[in-house]
């Protein structure tokens, strides 16, 4: 049996994994053998051994044989990420279109370009949120993609942005840092965008829409954090004239807060699920199991008890379904599952509290 030259010596492996054959498949190293301990212990013991050599490992079975597969760690970006670029450009277009509606502009004319502050606000808060995840992923040497923006014809022109994490999570610290970095970075951007938007002039609907019985009116529910920022900078969120509303840049801040709350829902692969799993360990799954029921109950309360039109109830019912799926998929399992220190736990509690300040039970209503 010849040993792979770039991997660790077999003698460094055999205390926990007996090796009887090795192969090289491209850049991957394959060690066939028999675990001497549980699979989880194999990973915990050998992860740092391979990581020092620049490899990430996974333990699996192929044709009835146990095989330890080591792949080179790759956290860089090869070439131009065309998918990311194309989705970014499409999202710019879709948010410009949505922004023109908030500004009461013609979206099918060059006027649509005047909605650029809305686009900048929306994509800024979403992009910085995802870049927070990306930067901490690189710091912990976890392979992750650049943000993928999701263009879709909604009231804000997008369904958000995501990054794709392709590597395993080395430790609870890494899981926590990557999970919490997005909401905190996004909230900083959200506060900046909101304060700027509150100081910009409001917009007024054209006279042709005022009093039109067929006109559709969008009413947003403002979360406590947005109310507090408006109070701190002494700027209004509401106007006596029903045709007048806040500058659409404020809507960008509202989106940042709404996205922060949704991401902090403590279930599965959401940011809140990562943070809770890092703080509580495997016990977080017991809390996550109740999350769908809470969301379904909120939807039922709004619709049947408060008699609010179905827009808000649908949002929470939809997220109840997503939370149910996320809870079945489960949370991330770090290789090193040692507990966090008090400092990170305090930051996690603070982030959860900030997420709650971004919650409003009736985020949006369509009237008319």
Image: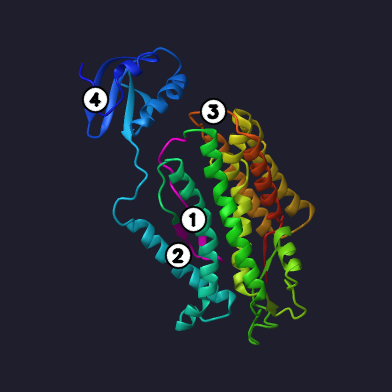
> Badge 3 is on which residue?
337
Crowding at label 4, few (<14), some or many (≥20) Cα neighbours within 10 Å? some
> Badge 2 is on which residue?
91
Q: Is residue 148 at all visible to an observer of this figure?
A: yes
> Badge 1 is on which residue?
161
Counting from the top left corner in percent of width and height, residue 179 is at 55, 44
Crowding at label 2, few (<14), some or many (≥20) Cα neighbours within 10 Å? many
* Quadrant of the snapshot with the C terminus: bottom right
Q: Is residue 325 at all visible to an observer of this figure?
A: no
Instruction: Looking at the picture, tell me which residue is in the foreground, 158 or 116.
Output: 116
Query: Label 4's element?
Result: loop
* Residue 282 location, quadrant: top right
In terms of sequence position, does the residue under pointer 4 or pointer 2 come before the other?
A: 4
Counting from the top left corner in percent of width and height, residue 309 is at 71, 60
Mark 1 vs mark 3: in front:
3
* Quadrant of the snapshot with the N terminus: top left
In terms of sequence position, does the residue under pointer 1 or pointer 3 come before the other?
A: 1
Residue at 55%, 67% in the rendered image: 121
Residue at 53%, 41% in the rendered image: 269
Query: Label 1's element?
Result: strand
Question: Is 324 placed above or below 191 here?
Answer: above
State the CA–CA distance, disc 4 to disc 2. 46 Å
């Amino acid at each position: 049996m010849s040993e792979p030259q770039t991997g660790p010596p077999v003698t460094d492996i055999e205390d926990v994994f007996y090796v009887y054959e090795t192969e090289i498949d491209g850049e991957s190293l394959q060690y066939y053998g028999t675990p001497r301990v549980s699979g989880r212990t194999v990973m915990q013991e050998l992860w740092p051994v391979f990581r020092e050599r620049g490899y990430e490992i996974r333990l699996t079975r192929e044709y009835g044989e146990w095989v330890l597969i080591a792949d080179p760690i790759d956290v860089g970006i090869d070439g131009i990420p065309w998918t990311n670029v194309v989705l970014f450009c499409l999202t710019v277009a879709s948010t410009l279109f949505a922004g023109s509606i908030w500004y009461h502009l013609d979206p099918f004319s060059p006027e649509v370009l005047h909605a650029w502050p809305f686009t900048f606000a929306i994509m800024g808060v979403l992009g910085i949120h995802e870049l927070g995840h990306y930067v901490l992923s690189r710091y912990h040497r976890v392979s992750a993609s650049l943000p993928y923006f999701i263009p879709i014809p909604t009231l804000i022109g997008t369904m958000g942005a995501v990054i794709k994490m392709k590597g395993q999570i080395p430790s609870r610290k890494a899981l926590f840092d990557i999970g919490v970095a997005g909401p905190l970075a996004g909230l900083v951007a959200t506060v900046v965008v909101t304060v700027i938007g509150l100081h910009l002039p409001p917009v007024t609907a054209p006279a042709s829409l005022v009093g039109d019985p067929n006109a559709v009116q969008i009413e947003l529910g403002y979360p406590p954090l947005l109310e507090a920022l408006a109070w701190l900078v002494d700027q209004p969120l509401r106007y006596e004239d029903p045709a007048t509303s806040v500058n659409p840049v404020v809507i960008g801040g509202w989106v940042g807060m709404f996205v922060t709350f949704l991401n902090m829902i403590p279930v599965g692969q959401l940011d809140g699920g990562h943070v809770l799993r890092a703080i509580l360990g495997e016990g977080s799954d017991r809390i996550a199991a109740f999350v769908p029921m809470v969301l379904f109950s909120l939807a039922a309360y709004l619709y049947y008890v408060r008699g609010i039109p179905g827009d808000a109830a649908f949002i929470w019912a939809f997220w109840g379904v997503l939370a149910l799926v996320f809870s079945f998929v489960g949370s991330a399992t770090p290789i090193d599952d040692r507990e966090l220190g008090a400092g990170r736990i305090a930051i996690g509690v603070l982030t959860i509290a900030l997420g709650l300040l971004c919650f409003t039970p009736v985020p949006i209503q369509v009237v008319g």
